[in-house]
């Protein structure tokens, strides 16, 4: 098949998916939360039942990814084991357990002319989700869209196709069990990259919003090519700031966890800032703890003087999302210098302050403009599940519509219901 024929084939496939999704969205908006929850619960059970089949499909993806030379961080994102599959299934149950995000009265009031006005939550419509590596996104994203009454078109990365498809089949069984149109959840049936381009540029009549989940290059492409609104973030350059009042042991535990619990997630800390007043106490202790666990420390001149195991940081290090066992460390004069550094180099994702001084924490909260701010807690809590939202599609750093973890509630819009008794507007 020549390139023109391939493009025509992709267009026909994608248009058919879009048409089916739009029709399903109309039906889904009228569905009951009971039926949507039943679909999620049944899909969760099927995922557990097919754990071995999902791991076998994942193994095919892992073998292929290794042959392609994917990094250790990417392989970690791709890998599924029994624990991760159980977590995925439990995530669907958690989504089913959250309150119905639809039909909520967000505000209501009456006008002097007798009109009663209410603002209520409604689905966005049809959501396109483009993601890389992590097959668990298939379940999380589909589950959140279903709970919020949105039809979804999933386009996972080619490296995770077998895993994602095995999970997708479980979700379809959930829909069928609940007698919901199976087109409410669709997965692009090709790894052809042109399908992504077509979804972004030529499906605005079907899609209401696109959510990218992946690396910088993917998100840059989505933002450049999308003809519908985009919810997402470009990078996760997250900071841990150790105030001079920080308890040494707490600072060590939080920093190590924030950086190394999982290095490949967007909430992993990439830069560590330490107050000059506590540098001699904290730098050797914290940096040694990181190095002992296999993390490379790239420090400024003061860090290098205080900790021999560090190497020189470059200007580029302060704005790099490593997604690996590497961290940049800088000693700053005070809290104001720390917040200024975050404003200059951060991505607006997640920042943490470790401090016994509560007033310092309040200054940090007031002065730092990121989606998620934490006091004395690891940046790895930047997660919708940890926030009690069931799960998340991702962390949004934009200031329009959704910000922070994007859960079911963030996948809704609203409309106004105006009830009258024959009122007409005077000329």
Image (spheres, rainbow, N blue to C red):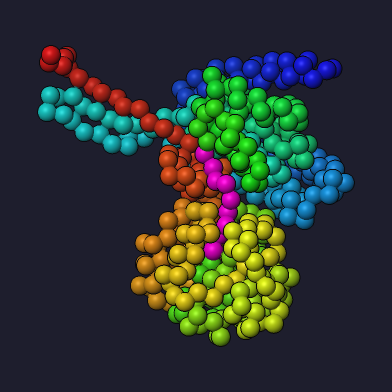
Residue 107: horizontal and vertical position, in percent?
Answer: 28, 36
Give yes or no for residue 233 being in the magenta stretch: yes
Front-lying residue, 331 or 207: 331
Taking 59 as reference, is 370 left or right?
left
10 versus 356 height, above or below? above
Q: Locate the N terminus and report the quarter of the image it occupies.
A: top right
Nearest the viewer among 366 and 390 is: 366
Q: Can residue 180 be seen in this view?
A: no
Give the left or right position of residue 231, taking residue 158 as reference: left
Q: Position of residue 287 (x, y in %)?
A: 64, 77
- Spot occupied by residue 390 in the image (x, y as percentages of width and height): 53, 46
173 vs 93: above or below:
above
Region of the chain picked out in magenta, as a range: 231-239
Q: Is residue 356 visible?
A: yes
* Residue under the point 42% across and 60% down: 368
Looking at the image, residue 172 lies above or below residue 380: above
Q: Position of residue 330 (x, y in %)?
A: 57, 72
Q: Which residue is drawn at 71% across and 44% down?
A: 133
Which quadrant is home to the C terminus? top left
Q: Is the magenta stretch mostly helix, strand or loop?
A: loop
Residue at position x 36%, y 62% from top?
366
């Amino acid at each position: 098949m020549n390139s023109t024929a391939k493009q025509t084939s992709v267009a026909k496939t994608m248009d058919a998916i879009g048409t089916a999704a739009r029709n399903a969205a109309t039906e889904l908006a009228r569905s009951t939360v009971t039926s949507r929850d039943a679909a999620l619960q049944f899909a969760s059970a099927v995922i557990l039942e097919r754990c071995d089949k999902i791991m076998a499909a994942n193994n095919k993806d892992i073998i292929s990814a290794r042959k392609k030379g994917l990094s250790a961080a990417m392989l970690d994102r791709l890998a599924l084991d029994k624990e991760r599959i159980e977590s995925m299934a439990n995530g669907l149950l958690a989504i089913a357990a959250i309150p119905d995000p639809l039909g909520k009265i967000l505000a209501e009031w009456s006008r002097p002319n007798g009109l009663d006005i209410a603002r209520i939550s409604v689905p966005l419509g049809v959501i396109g989700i483009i993601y890389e590596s992590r097959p668990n996104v298939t379940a999380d994203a589909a589950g959140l869209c279903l709970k919020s009454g949105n039809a979804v078109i999933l386009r996972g990365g080619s490296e995770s196709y077998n895993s994602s498809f095995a999970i997708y089949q479980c979700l379809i069984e959930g829909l069928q069990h609940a007698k919901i149109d199976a087109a409410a959840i669709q997965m692009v049936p090709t790894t052809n990259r042109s399908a992504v381009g077509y979804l972004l540029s030529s499906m605005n009549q079907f899609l209401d919003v696109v959510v990218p989940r992946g690396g910088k290059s993917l998100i840059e492409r989505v933002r450049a090519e999308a003809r519908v609104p985009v919810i997402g973030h470009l990078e996760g350059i997250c900071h841990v700031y150790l105030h001079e009042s920080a308890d040494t042991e707490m600072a060590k535990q939080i920093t190590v966890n924030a950086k190394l619990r999982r290095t490949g997630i967007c909430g992993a800390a990439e830069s560590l800032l330490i107050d000059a007043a506590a540098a001699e106490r904290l730098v050797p202790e914290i940096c040694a703890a990181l190095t002992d666990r296999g993390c490379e420390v790239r420090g400024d001149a003061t860090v290098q003087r205080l900790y021999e195991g560090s190497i020189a940081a470059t200007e580029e290090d302060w704005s790099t999302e490593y997604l690996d066992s590497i961290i940049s460390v800088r000693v700053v004069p005070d809290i104001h210098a720390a917040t200024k550094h975050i404003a200059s180099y951060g991505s607006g994702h997640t920042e943490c302050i470790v401090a016994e001084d509560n007033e310092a924490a309040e200054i940090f909260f007031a002065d730092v403009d990121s989606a998620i701010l934490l006091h004395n807690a690891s940046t790895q809590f930047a997660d919708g599940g940890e926030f009690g939202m069931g799960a998340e599609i991702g962390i949004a750093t934009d200031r329009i519509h959704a910000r922070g973890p994007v859960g079911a509630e963030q996948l809704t819009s609203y409309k106004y219901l105006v009830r009258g008794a024959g009122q007409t507007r005077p000329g």
